[in-house]
Image: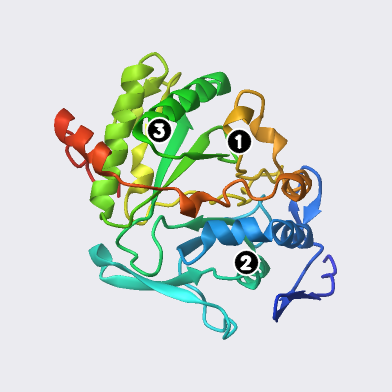
Amino acid sequence: MAQKSAAVELEVGPHTVRISNPDRVYFPARGETKLDLVNYYLSVGDGIVNALRERPCMLHRFPSGVAGEKVHQKRVPNGAPPWLETVRVTFPRYNRHADELCVTELAHVAWAVQMSTVEFHPWNSRRADTEKPDEWRIDLDPMPDCGYDRVRRVAHVAHEILDELGAVGWPKTSGGRGLHIYVRIEPRWGFADVRRAALAFAHEVERRAPDDVTTTWWRKDRDPRLLFVDYNQNARDHTIASAYSVRGNPEGTVSTPIRWTEIDDAEPGDFTIATVPARFAEVGDLHAGIDGAVFSLEPLLEWADRDGVEEPPDPG
């Protein structure tokens, strides 16, 4: 049996976070360890806290590293430190609730990594009112045979439409094969309205790029060469990896904020826990200004009314 490495203690802000098994390999492609993962998140501290701040957050945990089992964890376990913060969310369909992690400082992130978290998946609403999203998420999700050049083309179409709407879009890589664009919105509408607005936007992208885009509801009916503008990511309790979240793959890719001008040249594999710290030290948090660019969904809801867009079925 392999001997466990000795725990280390890190001072993260005013708190001490104990990291057990720091030498356990989490990312086999280059041999990065649990401690490497902690140090990555500390290196992008302002960015990851900004991305998660005061949002209910699902944790994707990999107790044995990313080659092993993945655990989706909503509830903060018993025995968490008293300085950890949570937010209660309800699941009416199941008559249940969960006290989810609510990050307000970097030590909360370090604690989650100690608990074997690799990916952070926050809600698009905050604890002040978890039923009123303040973030509209545009998920450019390539189908299996969709090349990345097509993702780039669609991103530019989405940018063009956002500019016409007067909305500021904040792009980032997904950490996989796609791109995400976030737009800060007024927290005036519920999830159903935000999703309906997102579908109206997706239809407009499809109208302008019909050879590249699909909004077809059922996956089995989509052309595998096209890109799906996934409006479903705005449904209640649907989450995607946050900005600066590492993804659970052997290379340790990172969902990384990028400039619009970088889209044509940046490759998804460029951004990993090995490369993003130096980039962050150079350019800082490219999403730092997102809270200062708030958009009203009213124009999109008018489009939805104009086009007869109904609330799509609950994705479950």
Q: Is residue 279 left or right of residue 199?
A: right
What residue lies at 61% left-to-right and 28% top-to-bottom?
Answer: 261
What residue lies at 31% left-to-right and 46% top-to-bottom?
Answer: 296
Residue beneath disc 3: 162
Q: Which one is earlier in the sequence, the residue at label 2 or at label 1?
A: 2
Mark in the foreground, 2 or 1:
1
How many numbered circles does the render carry? 3
Q: Which one is earlier in the sequence, the residue at label 3 or at label 2?
A: 2
Comparing 18 with 73, the one in front is: 18
Residue 108 image offset from top left, x and y in percent: 60, 71
Q: Quadrant of residue 120?
A: bottom right
Question: Residue 109, which numbered label?
Answer: 2
Which residue type carries mark 3? Leu
Which residue type carries mark 2? Val
User: Looking at the image, do the residues carrying marks 3 and 1 touch, with CB atoms under 8 Å apart?
Assistant: no
Q: For the N terminus, which image quadrant?
A: bottom right
Q: Quadrant of residue 300?
A: top left
Mark in the foreground, 3 or 2:
3
Label 3, label 1: how many angstroms apart (C-alpha)? 15 Å
Question: Residue 259, which numbered label?
Answer: 1
Residue 195: in sight, yes or no? Answer: yes
Label 3, label 2: how many angstroms apart (C-alpha)? 32 Å
